[in-house]
Amino acid sequence: MSKSPNILLPALGVTGIVLGGAYGTMTRGYKADEAEIARAHAQAAQAQLVEQRAMASDLKTQIAMVQDTAKAKIAELEARPAASASLTAPAPEREGAFGLGREALVEELAAWDVDVLPDGRGLPIGTGNALDGEELFADRCAACHGDFAEGVDNWPVLAGGFNTLADEDPVKTVGSYWPHLSTVYDYVYRSMPFGEAGTLSPDETYAIVAYILYSNDLIDDEFELSNKTLGSFEMPNKDGFVIDDRPEAEYAAWSAEPCMSNCKDEVTVTMRSVFLVNTPEDGGSESVINDATPEGLPSFTAAGASFIPEAEAQPKAAEEVAAVAAEEPVNEAAELIAAGDKVFKKCKACHAVGAGAKNKSGPQLNALMGRKMGSIEGFKYSKVFKAAAEKGRTWDATSLSEFLAKPKAYMKGTKMSFSGLKKDSDLEAISAYLASFSE
Amino acid sequence: MDEMHKPSRRAFLRGSAAVAAGTVAGAASAQSADPLITDVQDWASITGAGVDETPYGMPIEYESHVVRRNVEWLTASPISSINFTPIHALEGTITPQGCAFERHHSGAIEMKKDDYRLMINGLVDKPLVFTYADLERFPRENHVYFCECAANTGMEWAGAQLNGVQFTHGMIHNMEYTGVPLRALLNEAGLGAAGDLRDKWVYVEGADASSNGRSIPMEKALDDVLVAFKANGEALRMEHGYPVRLVVPGWEGNMWVKWIRRIEVSDTPTESREETSKYTDVLEDGIARKWTWVMDAKSVITSPSPQMPIEHGKGPLVISGLAWSGHGQITRVDVSKDGGITWETARLGKQGDTKALTRFYHDINWDGAPMLLQARAMDETGYVQPTKEQLRDVRGENSVYHNNCIQTWYVNAEGIAENVEVS
């Protein structure tokens, strides 16, 4: 029974090894070789000991002993400064150069050094206006950013959003937010169009940048944007930035010794996770709206939780909650649609339906019944949906139910990351609900 | 195998095992002998995989759930997107490269070492071009650093959003980098032409289609920035910038330019898209902070957490978590089980490296009652990780980046944890 030295030791890190060595010596006879090895390790480890903090007060004496040994070791090392300093020195530096690399050629610098500075330095010679830009933009940018730079789906919005920066969800666009026009030229020229970066000429870029300004009502269509006018152009939000002031605004106030006990009288849960996140075996994740509310959860005081709730208070997927509602004797169409409205909460993060519904990360779902699968213009469907569109397949209550019950099984390879509706009543309700949006 | 033992002896062994287990106070008692012990298992009899069966090993299939995961609807396209490190299921501090989060602006590119070029130009005595082989001839250093996306925990400004520490805090990884100090390369090109270095900048950009340019003040560039080509002992992964990336210790991940191709010494920041339109922090009044480079001290409990429920019931429970600070070392982490009324100081796995992840533990005897678990980090500057309320008081709720608030998990009596916000 006495073969394991001491269950406390693992917690003590290096100290543990040293004391373990000592213990091994005391119980000599059992695994004597290991004791020797441990002692050897202990000696090697002593140099590191200075930084070790005593962790268990009843071991104080042993630790003091060990620290004395360590101090002696340090003193010994310090007596040999040259040797010890070189042990973990930073990479050595040189007065002069190592003579590595070669001089960059002028053509090479011209090819890569194209960034543009706020005052316009770095701009190539060229010019363009919004009229030319409109056509180029429609051709090369609008598929993602919209004809008027208003943004399609989740793709960035480039225009509008003025006076929203102090609102709850500020709309940060080139017009409302960007402080320098040089940045627009620099970014578009080098990094756009997405997937075809670096293919715009300087003149085309000036024209497109002019069109973005025009879409933001910042210039008229005759304004010639060029290497001469760009650097001095003033953006509306040029004064909207301050240099990081966390040191004054935050660090000073948040560096006091923190409270350790009775820091508050009572703590309650004010909000529960909006999404539950499933993590399927084949990767990715599926977000499901969490219908649980903070009601029914205990509050906390220094004495602990106010009560231990029954198991219901666990986070619960919305579908179960909705199912309870849907299982009540409801046969009237209106009630079925109402139940479907609840089920649709699970789709809302990705789909819109109803008047003015736009594509989100999933296509809008208006007039779905009878609609061709994968047919919404401008939405980028997965291959399996494109194939269904080519075959001319359409949505009806049956195909929709089969799809929504197991999206990944029904449409193998779909990018709709949704685990599926388990209850038949939910499937029926969502069909009725979606069928109610005929236009 | 069975015939080798006499029935009577087997019965004796079974009987005594049960008795022995029953006498150990507190240990779970076995109802009957565990066949995993008493029966000879296949793995103890037939032979296993030979060497070289997987020349480069992957984790065993039973760990296949420990992977990076994305949340598709957050972005328009996976090419310009983010995924999350499974920090709930990792231990210690080093993040294996294969599950370290990815963030691309134009996708991860495949570039051969032979095709790699690094240009240094601008206010230098002699503009230079290095090959990959050139870089390997400079004296190099090894350092462990965390890399955190400035948007880590960004969703949570709007309240508790995603139920999983992988998704709330997983835009972080921590690796041991091997590389050349940037200062050595700048020195090679010569900084005489730059004159007074105090107001100078370096502009860094990548070779991918996004180019992801950022401006770094010279003081930082000459301090601890590394031009790195190895991580955790092996080549960088494609998704982390193979063959060469920049490592900017303690500063936001966007500045750690991958596939770095150019470093320009300049007399002004470039004010690129990534440092104006993005990575700036809109405050309540609509004014935005810029140049908020440092990642402030932060910590989170990784287990228990929503993806790591307590499955063993009452009794000994290991609360495990991570803490880090872009200002230096983590000096202390406190843990609360009651939503911040009472705090106890946790045990650090080991004294943290500067600007690297530190593991902390709080070992408790769980009584089975609900908990509101929180962790609070302190760093060597004395800074104390703030609550969400403190952050909102100063910044409002319009920021996307730099949310280093104290995170709360509600753990119910069944041991299930949920992301919540508390009063």
Image (spheres, coloured by chain):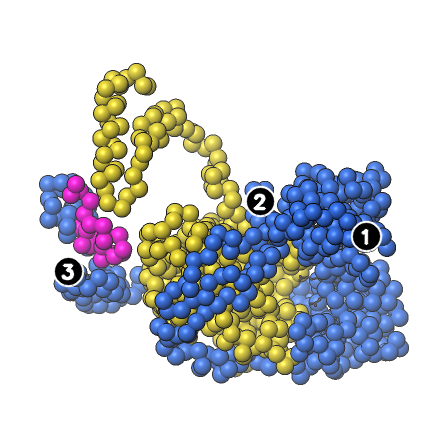
Chain colours: A blue, B yellow
In this rendering, do the residues under marks 2 and 1 share a single chain?
yes
Q: State the separation of the CA atoms marked 3 and 2.
A: 52 Å
Task: Name the kind of residue labelled 2 in the image.
Answer: Pro
Residue at the disc numbered 2: A280
The foreground one among A63 and A286 is: A286
What residue is rendered at 69% in x and 55% in y?
Answer: A342
Residue at the disc numbered 3: A62
Residue at the disc numbered 1: A436
What residue is rendered at 67% in x and 38% in y?
Answer: A409
Q: State the separation of the CA atoms marked 1 and 3.
A: 79 Å
What residue is rendered at 20% in x and 44% in y?
Answer: A4
Q: Which quadrant holds residue A171?
A: bottom right
In this rendering, do the residues under marks 1 and 3 share a single chain?
yes
Is B399 in the magenta?
Answer: no
Secondary structure category for the residue under label 1: loop
Secondary structure category for the residue under label 2: loop
Dot 3 crowding, Cα within 10 Å, few <14, some 14–19, many 20+: some
Find the magenta span and give its range: A1-21
For the stretch drawn in magenta, the main secondary structure is helix
Secondary structure category for the residue under label 3: helix
Q: Earlier in the sequence, mark 3 or mark 2?
A: 3
Measured from the top left, where is residue B368 in percent x and y? 38, 54
Q: Earlier in the sequence, mark 2 or mark 1?
A: 2
Task: Name the kind of residue labelled 3 in the image.
Answer: Gln
Task: Name the kind of residue labelled 1 in the image.
Answer: Ser
Dot 2 crowding, Cα within 10 Å, few <14, some 14–19, many 20+: few
Is A5 in the magenta?
Answer: yes
Q: Chain of mark 3?
A: A
In this picture, residue A189 sits left or right of residue A85: right
Residue located farthest toward the front when viewing the structure as drawn: A329
